Image (cartoon, helix red, strand yellow):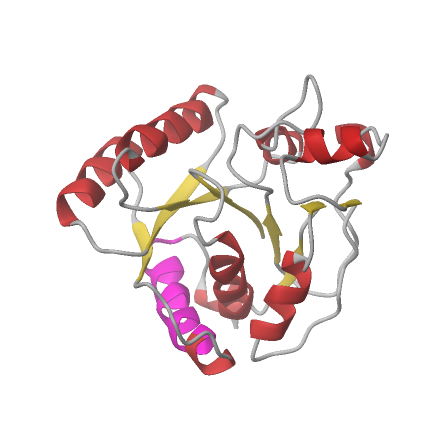
């Protein structure tokens, strides 16, 4: 199984969530488009309790900005045609998007087009800042409009039950994880939350015990 980790905005916590899901599924990890350094691939690999092979990015851009803008500065053309799912040694793979779902890759293609091209089930990372309901529901609506499979929501940061309940109602999918604001990012922390994710993936029939074992 491959899962696409995306978010309602930039800096929502996708890389930490990706590390947690990678550990939960004992999966491979891939970030197809990276803009800026240090790379999220480096971050995820440092966080993982279980070491895995590094899969190179399809595009490694210099500037920490939207991929289309960084690529333009570097005279590079980012194209979905050049983003192909890599071979890997695991049963599962976590694919982390760049920024939010509607971040441009170029003048015509968006990050969500990667998920659509390969029909990747999506896990959406949401937050509870002022305006996050609107950002979350717009992301959910676009996923639904394209007929993609939203398998669950992860809430990262300050807890707000009212905000979370509204988002979950409209998403009509389970909350797979609630993450507090994490100050201590270590391998043991990732492992702790990976166990919760694994249990929730099994409980919601997203994976089976035999498939995960």
Decide whether the magenta segment is chiefly helix, strand or loop: helix
In the depicted structure, whether residue 132 falls above or below residue 14: above
From the viewer's perspective, is 148 left or right of 29?
left
The residue positioned 49% from the left and 68% from the top of the image is 24
The residue positioned 67% from the left and 23% from the top of the image is 109
Q: For the magenta stretch, what is the residue range?
A: 190-205
The outermost residue toward the right is: 75
In the depicted structure, whether residue 206 falls above or below residue 170: below
From the viewer's perspective, is 87 left or right of 127?
right
Picture quarter containing residue 107?
top right
| Front position in the image: 104 or 145 | 104
From the viewer's perspective, is 168 left or right of 31?
left
Picture quarter containing residue 138?
top left
Q: Is residue 181 magenta?
A: no
Q: Position of residue 18 (x, y in %)?
A: 53, 58
The residue positioned 83% from the left and 35% from the top of the image is 74
| Front position in the image: 80 or 99 | 99
Q: Position of residue 151 (x, y in %)?
A: 41, 44
Q: Position of residue 170 (x, y in %)?
A: 25, 31
In the depicted structure, whether residue 171 falls above or below residue 28: above
Q: Is residue 196 magenta?
A: yes
The residue positioned 56% from the left and 80% from the top of the image is 49
Q: Position of residue 27 (x, y in %)?
A: 61, 64
Picture quarter containing residue 144?
top left
From the viewer's perspective, is 144 left or right of 158?
right
The outermost residue toward the left is: 162
């Amino acid at each position: 199984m491959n899962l696409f980790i995306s978010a309602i905005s930039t800096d929502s916590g996708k890389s930490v969530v990706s590390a947690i899901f990678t550990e939960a599924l004992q999966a491979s990890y891939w970030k197809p488009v990276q803009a800026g350094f240090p790379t999220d691939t480096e971050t995820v690999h440092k966080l993982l309790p279980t070491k895995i092979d590094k899969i190179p990015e399809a595009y490694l851009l210099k500037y920490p900005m939207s991929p289309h803008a960084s690529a333009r500065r570097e005279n590079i053309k980012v194209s979905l045609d050049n983003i192909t799912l890599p071979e890997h040694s695991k049963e599962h793979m976590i694919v982390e998007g760049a920024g939010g779902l509607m971040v441009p890759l170029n003048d015509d293609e968006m990050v969500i087009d990667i998920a659509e091209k390969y029909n990747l089930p999506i896990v959406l990372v949401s937050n509870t800042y002022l305006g996050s309901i609107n950002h979350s529901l717009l992301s959910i609506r676009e996923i639904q409009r394209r007929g993609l499979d939203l398998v669950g929501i992860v809430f990262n940061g300050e807890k707000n039950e009212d905000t979370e309940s509204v988002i979950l109602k409209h998403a009509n999918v389970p909350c797979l994880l609630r993450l507090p604001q994490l100050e201590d990012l270590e391998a043991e922390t990732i492992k702790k939350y990976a166990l919760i994710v694994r249990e929730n993936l099994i409980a919601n029939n997203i994976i089976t015990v035999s498939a995960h074992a």
